[in-house]
Each structure stands twice: as structure tokens, then as C-alpha cells.
Amino acid sequence: MQTHLLEMTGITKRFPGVLALSDVSLHLGAGEVLALMGENGAGKSTLMKILGGAQPPDLGRILIDGREVTLGSVRDAKTLGIALIHQELMLAPNLDVAANIFLGTEQGRNFWLSPLQRKPMREVAAQLLKRVGLSLSPDTLVSTLTAGQMQMVEIAKALSLNARIIIMDEPTSSLTSGESEHLFHIIRQLKSEGIGIIYISHRMEEVLNLADRISVLRDGRYIGDLLRSEATHDKVVALMVGRELSGNYFPQHSPDPSAEVVLEVENLHVPGAPAGVSFSARRGEILGFAGLVGAGRTELMQTLFGVTPALSGNVRLLGKDFMPRSPREAIDRGVYLAPEDRKRHGLVLPMSIAQNTSLPNVSTYSKFGFLNRVKERNVAESEVKRLRTKASSIEQLTVNLSGGNQQKVVLGKWLAMTPQILILDEPTRGIDVGAKAEIYRHMAELAKNGITLIMVSSDMEEVMGMSDRVLVMHERRIKGELTREQLSEQRIAQLMTGKVEGAAA
């Protein structure tokens, strides 16, 4: 019988009022890429925290090379060659690359006042950077790196610990398509060296192309495995959600091409952009914005929402001048933004789900200076049910929700209101496939009801599946426009990289 590199059997974990994991088992072979999938709240993060030594299991066994081990701390896990790369990268931006790679394992620090051996650390760091395909100096400040480069530094850090098992949690969520391809190349290289990879992602296409095997959790329980040869989009979804998704994954939507123009943007000059941008959006349209990370999409949306003042230009909303000086002014005119960074800009984490839901429109929940808690609870419960947010109750603090469920609360608070324009910046980042389908259906329903949606997305499948029209940005300019009939991955990619040959611009 073959001995697995890793085996977890009968893992059970309880939190107050919640059974997070119930008798979960999985295994990983040397040189295998195992995709771990499941809806938000299925138990993936808890299981990986147990494997990473951050949390102890209540029941169960963990075996490395057939030998039972106890992971009492993160240090224990690292000593055994287990490295966890979080979705939100754990690097110190004020330190250089070499210092980050060896943070906590510095060479030469045998006692408190002993000097660090900086030269050997830089030399080893340079070798590790070369191994992951980064042509950077080890002295480069991490704050100057792109998201893709930071991801490679995290992998180099794991390799510095002689990691044999590397856990990657949503590693492509902030990467460009080119950076993602580089990551996949590195993963295949690590696989060839006998390193086992546990890969957590909601992006079905990359999972089906990358994983040797897919393990699925649902409601804290192990559901089953699929080999790459037998895995399909529909089979994985059925295991994850316990049912077939009815209807089209991307709902059909046909906007009226003669509908009134709701938003007119003329030569709007956003801080940091080399020139102004111009575009329009019609009532009931889903207008997609595509582009590489750093193309200026988020900055443009923040200006439309009043976060950053424009330098010049004209904007008209329903025929009237619209140049908001604050988000409050934009909200009062019916323009809402669900931001990309939910934790910093989309939520007040110490508040409950109900409080976050009512916050943007709290005056409508008040009478004679008193908050109508019944109305607040009713609206919050309606949005939680609609988006299938997994929480113990609407009184649960949002800080204690998973990332995907936090994103659902952000969406829910805006959907509880009646916007003229709803701007969605990476609306399904970190959200499971079942909830994505529901959000897409709701987006189509909103558009059908005459609400204009502006969607910024780095997910090519999402852009093509949901957009009625796509504007592609490159270096903070609108490089081209594509109608639904003109949409193709090649055309979008050409515009995103500044190449317009063969694309309809």
C-alpha cells in the first residue's frame, strides 16, 4: 500500500455553536496538485489552519510519510515542511525581499544581541528568487512589488523552509493573467520536484487545468474526490452545492439598445491618468470594464463614487451635472460602489451583518431619532437569505465571517437599496461557484428592472459572460470598446496589453 505524503483522517473541529468540520479526511501525494473546493463556510480554511498548525483539531489524526504527528503551533508545521500561503499575503512591506524570506528564521540570530548574517541570507534569497523566476535584487523593498511578485516571494519563503507541502489559498485572486500563468508554471515545476500542493480556488477553469485531483467539502464534511480525467464544471458544482445549478450559469440578458443614457462621462481626468476618458452607460445595461491590474479601472470608479476628486472633465447623471465631492453625495444621487477591498472600504468589521446592511441608508431605518431594529433585522435577513450568506445569525460580527461571506454582506447592503447605478468592483472575488451563479442572476434581474450596472472584473469568463458591452483599459486609458457580438478572449487580451491589431476598437 502506497504511503501518502500527507494524510488527515477523521478531523473534527467545533467552535461555540458551530460544527466547523465533521470527520473530514483527505490525502496528498508527493508531486501532486490537490484542489480543495467547497462553498464559502464549507470548512476549507479551518482544515488548512489545522494543517498549518494555527488551530488544533478536536478529533482526528495527521500523518506525514505515514508517521503520526502533532501540530501544536505554526512553528511545528513549518518544521515538518508545511507552508501556508494566505490569500491576503503576509509580507512586511517596509522590509526588503531577503528580510521577508527569512523573517522569523534569520541566520545568525542564536541569541538576542547576535548580529544577523546578512550576506549569506541575501545570497540564499537570490537563489530562491531565481528558482521562482523573479529577476529581482534581494534588497528590493516589498512595498514596490506587484501582487504577482509578492506571490512569488511567498513561495520563495516557503522554499527557504524546505517545504514539502505548500498550501495556496486563492493565489490568483489579485494577479493579472500573465502573473497567473507564471504562477502555474512555478506550481508545475514544484510538482516535478516532488512537492505536494494543496490549491484552494473558486476559479473553476484554472482548477480543472491545474489539479491532478479535486477534493470537495460541503457544510464541514468531506463529500468526495474527482480525478482530473473525470472532473467537469458541472460535476464539481454538483458536489459543492449538492444539486445541479438550474438554468444557464450566466443568465441571458438583452438590454434595450435605445434605452436612455443614464451616465455620460466626457474627458474625465482622474488623478494619475495621462489623459481623460469618455464613455456612456444606458439604463438596464451591464457595462464591463476589463484590464490588467493597475490599468486604472478602480481609480476611475472611485472618482465616479466621489472618493477621489476629478482633475477635469464632465459627468452627467440622467442629464444633470454629476461630479460628487464625497461618497455621501454619490449615494444621495443613487450611485453606489461595492469596492474591491471589502475589509478596508466595504465593511465595518466590528459591526454585525445587520448593522453593516443598514449603515449606508441608516436614516431610512430611523424614526424620531430611534433606530427601527425590527426593520433592520428584516432587511438584513432578506439579503442574507437571497445571497445565501453563511452565518450563525444576522447579529454575527462581520470580522468573524469568511472572506466570501464578507463580500456577500457588502453586496447585500447595496442591493437592499434602490440604485440608479451600481458599480461592482470585482463582485465575485473569493465567492464560491454556487453563490456566483446567484449573484449573476440577481445582477441580470437588476438590469432587467432598469438599473445600470458597471462591473469591473479580472475574471475573463465573468467579463464575457455577464457584460452587454466591454470597455478595456490599458495604462489608465480606455483602449477600446467591444459589443457582446465582438467579445472574445483574444480581442480583450490584445486591448488589455495595448495591442489593437485585429481587435475592434
Image: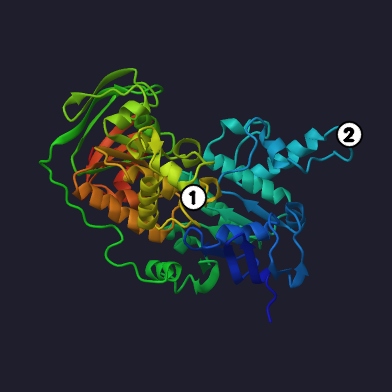
Q: Picture coordinates of residue 125 (x, y %)?
A: 71, 40
Res 500 → quadrant: top left
> For the residues marked 2 and 1, what is the alpha-carbon distance in whole angstroms?
50 Å
Residue drawn where x is 53% and y is 50% of the image: 183
Residue drawn where x is 38% and y is 57% of the image: 385
> In the rendered structure, which disc, 2 or 1, sits on the residue that comes first in sequence?
2
The reply, left or right, for residue 310 in relation to residue 484 is right
Residue at the extreme front? 368
Q: Crowding near pointer 1: few (<14 within 10 Å), some, many (20+)? A: some
Res 29 → quadrant: bottom right
Please state which amino acid type lies under the numbered disc 1.
Answer: Glu
178 to 322, vertically: above or below? below
Q: Picture coordinates of residue 181 (x, y %)?
A: 48, 50
Residue drawn where x is 31% and y is 38% of the image: 472
Q: Circle 2 sits on which residue?
A: 114
Residue at the extreme left? 258
SS for dot 2: loop
Q: Circle 1 sits on which residue?
A: 395
Res 95 → quadrant: top right
300 to 342, vertically: above or below? above
Quadrant of the image containing the N terminus: bottom right
